Amino acid sequence: MTSERVTPVEPRAAPDLVELAKIVARQRAEMDRLRDQAATSAVVERAKGAVMALTGCPADAAGERLRRRAKAARRTLLEECWITLGTLAPTAHGPGKAADGAGTATPDFWSDWPAQAAPDDVAPALARLGQALVRVMTPQDLARCLLEHLAADLAADAVMIYARRPDGGLELTGHAGIDDKLAAQWSQVPPLSGIAALDALRSGEPRWLEDFAADAERYLLIGDPPERWRSRAWLPVLVGDSAEVCIGVLRGRAEPFTPRDRAHLRGVTGLCAGRLRAFDAPAERSADAATDAVQALFEALPVAAMLLTPLRAASGAVEDFRVEAATDQVGELLGRAGEAPAGRRLLEFRPALVAEPLWRGCLQVLATGQPYEGERFAHEEVVAGVAELFTYTARVAPLGDALVVSWIRHGSSDRQEHRLADIQRLGNLGWANWNLATREASWSTQVFTIVGRDSARGPVPLDELPELALPEDTPALTRAVNELGQEGRPFDIPFRIRTSGGIRHLRLVAEAVSDRHGTPVEVHGFVQDMTARRRAELALVESERAILTQHDVLQAERTLASLLQHALLPLANRPVHLAGLRVEVAYLPAQSGVHVGGDWFSTIELPDGDALLVVGDVAGHGVDAVATMAQLRFTAKGMVITGSSPTGALARLNTLLLHSRDSHTTATMVLARYSPRQRRLVWAQAGHLPLLLLRDGEARYLRRPRGMLLGATTTPVYEEAECRLEPGDRLILFTDGLVEHPPESIDRGLERLAEAVAAPPHDGPRSLGPLLTQLLPEVRRDDVCVVDVRVPEVREQ
């Protein structure tokens, strides 16, 4: 018997809300994927631009060079782009120009640089880091990303990132794995000797601190206490021939950095060089009175805003925008709090913006000259130390060849109005008002959506509302509307309408407002779309009907199968004697479920005086299983009576199952023949459990001869086994319902059966009933069939 696991559903969860949650989850995952894709594309395009600026080649050729170098070094294209951005420094003379301005192409020395490949066991880790770097926006993000990347592979416990100050000292720009107190103590490092990070920056070579005692004498070690990290590495991040940033990797274990570890960390600094260059402060713009005036104007604006000028490719397409001026709030709204976007490329400042509606809105305004206003979005801000959620709308307006982007924060009344609209949309309901004196009506936008009516046609007057309903629902709705208008009696009534999307089930709840004389003058209420709920109710009713019908069919089938089973398996009221053996049988049907199983037995004395003992189990339940059981029971008996051996009978029964029925089924069986003259038991089995023999107070299972499940294969193999029974022996044949009781394993069930049979008897020879009571649970999920065979003592014969 098998069962299928069912995924639990939260009680009272509406099916449509569950589906909505799944859709939202998929949309969020898709948005994250698009953002990563956009950020990755921005990195690739920046790398191509660096190659173009250095070599003067077109964009396609630059992309091909990057791909060739990535393939030669066995790196991903994204890794190659990070390394390129950190290594190449475009000349100040422009692409394809010599320093003297004569127009001579610069030497293509970049193509001659060796493409050093990382070791094979390091390459996958570097590829993952290259992909993760597209989501890194600040040096602090980079430190956390590196610690997550290096913790498992190199057992790193902390990462620190230092940048060289103009005075030669160091400034801590990012850290992970250390507390804020320690970070504050080491946030500024003066230009002293004995600082490993400074030593690495000055020499341009890593410093591997692997002997704590020796390193403590040579360097001033970071830590409180310093013994917290027993091994360290300080690696300069080279940009061209110089290094301005140093990355520290600190480990708690006192082990040297292996050659693989060193190659891994060198690869990490190569990738980080490109990412760190994006964190550099924008180049100082030339002093320009107009530019300064624009920036001063924007700084005085009471809203978040920025001025953008488009940057076009050779084809004329817009590939980015330069932020000419911006207010202080822009960085926070773009997810880069504390950073100033002025003077930088927009996609360099926020690469993920290319996948957001604001980017498409900017392109749309450039193309059409018409202003753009985006959807409202929520943004969390900290006000007086408390996080609050505010609602914003982004707007884009043309200003000559430039664009002005502004964000408008909505007040509390605007937010409440927006929330009301959300409630109507999520609840699929809308409000409606009717003035009975002037016959004016007003509907919310959601009501037009619900009834499938164009808002340009206006709302439907109250007395004409019944005309929207189906003919069979019109009288009830008309009567309710008349009683409301004349007597002021409120109503809550369901009705159906026909729309382009099919039949919809609606609910209209309305009440009247009366004047001082009690005459209704105004009606207000709401309309709710109940289609999904009504369909669910109808489906539930239909399902209940089907279940009841199926239950009746199954109950009738169980009754029929039970009658057949009792007719085919007559049970003796007391033990019988066959060939000198005392045989007791028991059959117990399952107590759970509505099906009758296919367990069966056969105990007869053959014409030559031998005894035939058979126990079998047909797969499945119901009438089909009982019919197959009857076929096997009588056929096996006939074959043995006519002279077939146990193995020959099993082979023929296997063929019978394979070819006699359209719906293929299988069965297990034990077939044993006992000769009283030699007290010799010859038996064979087909995928069945072994026989249990009790002798001299010790219970053991007989070794099973080879035997395939009946009906499983056209080429089965069956073997016989022989056992000589002694006076006082007890032999038990049984089906799996006796020993298989989930969640307990069947092996444990077999052990319990052997222990129970070997226990000293307390009730004389008839102990099968108490044995079953001891072994079986209160509720049986499967049939149980047992044949208990005893060889009498010599004196009993």
Image (spheres, rainbow, N blue to C red):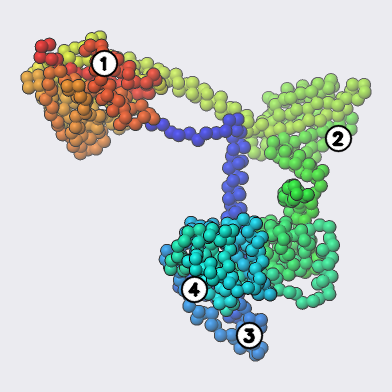
User: Mark 4 sits on what residue?
Assistant: 69
Q: How far is disc 1 from disc 4 in space, using C-alphas?
A: 82 Å
The image shows residue 50 at horizontal and vertical percentages of 60, 75
Q: How far is disc 3 from disc 1 in space, using C-alphas?
A: 103 Å
Please tell me which residue is depicted at 52% across the width and 65% down the height of the picture. 232
Of tags 1 and 4, the one toward the viewer is 1
Residue 459 vs residue 316: left or right?
Answer: right
The image shows residue 754 at horizontal and vertical percentages of 26, 25
Please tell me which residue is depicted at 89% across the width and 21% down the height of the picture. 518
User: Residue type at mark 4?
Assistant: Arg
Image disc number at residue 97: 3
Q: How far is disc 2 from disc 4 in space, using C-alphas?
A: 73 Å
The image shows residue 745 at horizontal and vertical percentages of 34, 31
Going by the picture, which residue comes out furthest to the right?
A: 516
Find numbered disc 1 in the image and state the secondary structure of the residue it sits on. helix
User: Residue type at mark 1?
Assistant: Leu
User: Residue type at mark 3?
Assistant: Lys
Asked if residue 293 can be seen in this view, the reply is yes
Residue 724 vs residue 548: left or right?
Answer: left
Find numbered disc 3 in the image and state the secondary structure of the residue it sits on. loop
Labels in figure, total: 4
Please tell me which residue is depicted at 80% across the width and 26% down the height of the picture. 511
User: Mark 2 sits on what residue?
Assistant: 440
Q: Nearer the viewer, residue 240 or 612?
A: 240
Q: How far is disc 2 from disc 3 in space, using C-alphas?
A: 75 Å
Q: Earlier in the sequence, mark 3 or mark 1?
A: 3
Q: How far is disc 1 from disc 2 in space, using C-alphas?
A: 88 Å
400 shown above or below 21: below
